[in-house]
Amino acid sequence: MAKKNLHRRKAVALPAAHVEVSTDAITIVVPEVVGKNSSHTGGRGGLRFTSSHTKAFRASVESGIITHRTLAMAGPNVLEAIGNSQAMRGTWRLEVVGVWPTKRDVVAGRPADFLMPCGDADAAIPQALDALQYAGVLDDDARVVEVRAWNLYRKDVRATVMRLVRVSLDLVERDTAIAHLLPLVPQSPEPPAKPARKRKAKPT
């Protein structure tokens, strides 16, 4: 019952996310983490709707980006400062940490054998990608060619730390990271052989 109540906590308006920008990275810290069970709500006929928790999360990211760009407009390099807050060219890596306020003491009926946050490591990934697009930072998550995610327990703290890091267009960083897995990737099938053309017999 306690677990169900945890998922039913009320969504509240969030302050603007903290944003830091450099030429090769965009870092955003949101004072919230949204779990898989809180991201959407169910409706009639099996329909699913964006939850108030998700809307508040996205609004926090958007407000943080707007604040950053507003301040950047007062600086000497307006176009550069605003442009650096966009990931609309090239390829990127997403790093995301979901910080959860509670921990699990039991897993699969047995005592947990490590400090286990009460939230999955991958839970923050879709929230981060959707919020980055919603806020106009990322034009398409197809630009994200690599994702690294972690979960972290910190008592009474809810937060999501996300960072987009630019990677080279030749994807050498990605291929180096997965070099041990590449031999296991199936090869593309050979194209089917074209049937030999029948030669017409020459008239005698």
Image (cartoon, rainbow, N blue to C red):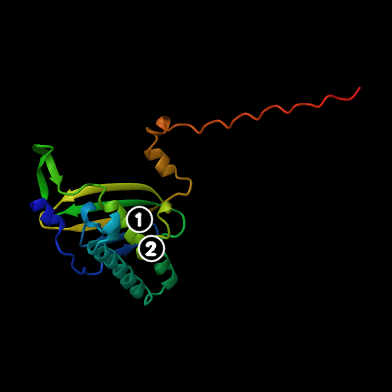
Q: Residue at x 22, y 62 (%)?
A: 53
Q: Nearer the viewer, mark 1 or mark 2?
A: 2
Q: Position of residue 33 (x, y in %)?
A: 21, 57
Q: Residue at x 41, y 43 (%)?
A: 173
Q: Position of residue 83 (x, y in %)?
A: 43, 66
Asked whether, in this view, residue 204 is left or right of residue 106, the answer is: right
Q: Mark 1 near mark 2, Cβ–Cβ under 8 Å?
A: yes
Residue found at the very far top of the displayed protein: 204
The residue beneath circle 2 is 137
Q: Quadrant of the C terminus?
A: top right
Which tag, 1 or 2, sits closer to the chain's start?
2
At label 2, the amino acid type is: Val
Q: Quadrant of residue 87?
A: bottom left
- Circle 2 crowding by C-alpha within 10 Å: few under 14, some 14–19, many from 20: many
Asked whether, in this view, residue 34 is left or right of residue 1, the answer is: right
Q: Position of residue 24 (x, y in %)?
A: 39, 57
